[in-house]
Image (cartoon, rainbow, N blue to C red):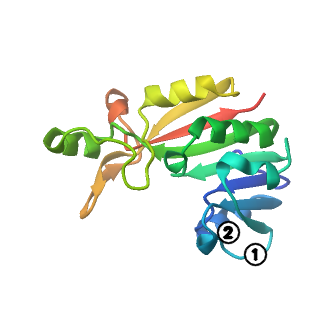
Amino acid sequence: MRYVFPSARVLEIGASNPARTQGLSRWCRELIGVELMPERTPKDLGNVRYFTGDWQNLDHLVAPESIDVAVSTHVIEHVPNDLRAINELYRVLRPGGIAILNTPNRKRLTRALIEKFTGRRIFPYGEHQREYSETDLKQLVEYSLFRRYSIFPIVFGLHGGPIYAYTSSVPAGLRELASFWEIHLFKD
């Protein structure tokens, strides 16, 4: 938890996994969990307060410049207006704050192999409004209010269904085929 500190106020978007949220809450003073679906919104516990709400409209849940760290795991690909969602994070982060997101890579090895036989996946697909290549993410962030960011490939290999063969380190030459992206957005 290198960005979370004991006095931090943390925002978790997509907070329907209480065990994950409680694990994160041990590292901070307060955690605000936002979940879109009321039936998946857990009950408040300890230093965690949960709200049902939409990432694209945080204004009625979170005050401007009140969050030190925002996290979101596999949510941005579900959001209809991803640019609006990113800009909402900018609005609620304090100067010096960071948002950490991760999302599937549209060009991941598993997807690339499947598409060799089935053709390119058209979005929206299932619950995903879209998936991102590294170029897509760079373009999204460059249109946003954030000026400083980093994008990292995380996990490489085959996973899905009964097959799980992967490594958490991504060989440099295979970056484009990484399974997931992690994005760090810094508010100056």
Q: Residue at x 67, y 41 (%)?
A: 99
**Amino acid under label 2?**
Gln
The C terminus lies in quadrant:
top right
139 or 54, which lies in front? Answer: 54
The numbered disc on residue 22 is 2
Count of numbered tags: 2
Horizontal relation, residue 95 to residue 102: left or right = right
Q: Residue at x 40, y 42 (%)?
A: 169
Please state the horizontal and vertical placement of residue 55, each as a whole percent of the image.
Answer: 66, 50
Please state the horizontal and vertical placement of residue 25, each as a whole percent of the image.
Answer: 72, 63
Horizontal relation, residue 101 to residue 167: left or right = right
Residue 96 versus residue 76 in the image, above or below = above
Q: Residue at x 28, y 44 (%)?
A: 111
Q: Say few, some or many: other residues with alpha carbon within 10 Å of mark 1 (under 14 / 14 to 19 / 20 or more).
A: few
97 or 120, which lies in front? Answer: 120
Whether residue 42 is visible, yes or no, is yes
Please state the horizontal and vertical placement of residue 185, each as a whole percent of the image.
Answer: 65, 34
What is the C-alpha distance between the residues marked 2 and 1?
Answer: 8 Å
Residue 44 versus residue 74 in the image, above or below = below
Whether residue 1 is visible, yes or no, is no
Mark 1 lies on residue: 45
CB contact under 8 Å: marks 2 and 1: yes
**Amino acid under label 1?**
Leu
Q: Quadrant of residue 156?
A: top left
The numbered disc on residue 118 is none
Horizontal relation, residue 59 to residue 120: left or right = right
- Disc 2 is placed on an element classified as helix
Sequence-wise, the earlier of marks 2 and 1 is: 2
Residue 176 versus residue 20 in the image, above or below = above
170 or 109, which lies in front? Answer: 109
